[in-house]
Image: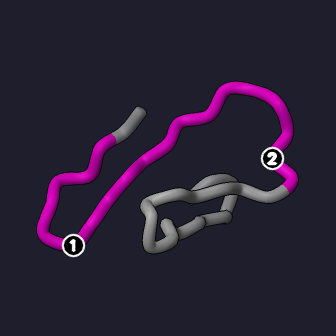
Amino acid sequence: MLNGLETYTNAGGNYAFADLEPGEYVLQFSKEGYEPLVY
């Protein structure tokens, strides 16, 4: 979660965070049955 926020992909795999301030963030991607990825 990002500062208590999370988002989900749509059918095309796209996602967005509304009103995200400029800066550096750590993103974690996860799906049941797979190891999470952190960028």
Q: What element carries label 1?
A: loop
Q: Earlier in the sequence, mark 1 or mark 2?
A: 2
Q: Which residue is drawn at 62% across and 34% down?
A: 25
Over which residues does the magenta segment extend?
19-37
Residue 33 in the image: above or below residue 26? below
Position of residue 21 in the picture relative to residue 25 (left or right): right
Position of residue 27 in the picture relative to residue 5 (left or right): left
Question: What residue type is disc 2 on?
Answer: Leu
Q: Which residue is drawn at 50% across and 42% down?
A: 27
Q: Is the magenta stretch mostly helix, strand or loop?
A: loop
Q: Residue at x 66, y 56 (%)?
A: 16
Measured as percent of width and height from the top left, residue 15 is found at: 57, 58
Write down the residue under mark 1: 32
Q: Magenta stretch: residue 15 in it?
A: no
Position of residue 18 in the picture relative to residue 13 (left or right): right
Question: Residue most toward the front?
Answer: 12
Q: Which mark is residue 20?
A: 2
Question: What residue type is disc 1 on?
Answer: Glu
